[in-house]
Image: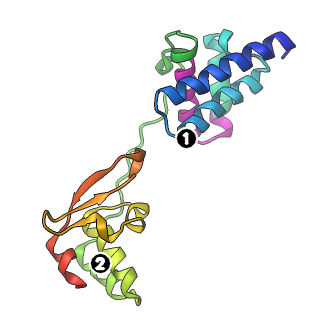
Amino acid sequence: MNTHEQQRFDFLYEQHLTNLTLQGKRPATIDAYSRAVRRISAYFDACPDNLSTDDLKRYFASLIDSHSWSTVKLDRNGLQFFYRHVLNQHWEWLNIVKPPQVQRLPDILTPAEVSIVISLTHKLRYQVCFLALYSMGLRLGEAISLQVGDIDSQMMQVHIRNAKGGKDRLVPLPQRTFTTYL
């Protein structure tokens, strides 16, 4: 990039970061979306504000060959945000790249299998953690960060703090989970 184009990119990039922050995006999202703008700029050695649809198609074709679909989707979303909120342009990403729709079913353990896993665990604290994970449908990070004060035994609910997306939620506390290790 020449000096003038680099200055234009720097200005637009700063606007991009500001808009991401103003839209309340999480730090990981800001990092991924800003990386998308930097990556396409480096690919073309140009400011991404004047790229054609053919340029974008060529870029994503190259990206699909070298990166995972997860990265492709993040770059697509980051560039879409850049076009909409920084350049004030409508960018229809469906016409450029559409990841395959993959729906995988998770491995689900039967109650008997869960009971075996818990009973074969030697430490009581791990048994409690596994039972909480399974019976309340928690993510590992949610279960690890639980504190005694998060349990409301009157309402039979557990307050999950700062869960996925930084949101709090209340989860029903099964009676068996509450009374098993008392």
- Horizontal and vertical percent position of residue 80: 53, 21
- Horizontal and vertical percent position of residue 64: 62, 34
Q: Secondary structure at mark 1?
A: helix
Magenta stretch in the rendered image? 64-82
Looking at the image, which residue is at 39% across and 86% down?
Answer: 121
Query: Is residue 44 depicted above or below 159 in this figure?
Result: above
Looking at the image, which residue is at 36% across and 55% down?
Answer: 161
Residue bearing mark 2? 113
88 or 79: nearer the eye?
Answer: 88
In the drawing, does residue 31 fall left or right of residue 165?
A: right
Query: Is residue 119 depicted above or below 162 in this figure?
Result: below
Count the labels in the image: 2
Task: For label 1, count other residues whose C-alpha is less than 10 Å away and answer few (under 14), some (14-19) or many (20+).
Answer: few
User: Between tags 2 and 1, which lies in front?
Assistant: 1
Query: Is residue 118 depicted above or below 95 in this figure?
Result: below
| Quadrant occupied by the N terminus | top right
| Quadrant occupied by the C terminus | bottom left
Magenta stretch, main secondary structure class: helix
Q: Secondary structure at mark 2?
A: helix
- Horizontal and vertical percent position of residue 115: 27, 81
Residue 27, numbered label: 1
Could you tell me the amino acid type at mark 2?
Glu
Q: Are marks 2 and 1 in contact (CB under 8 Å)?
A: no
In the drawing, does residue 92 fall left or right of residue 63?
A: left
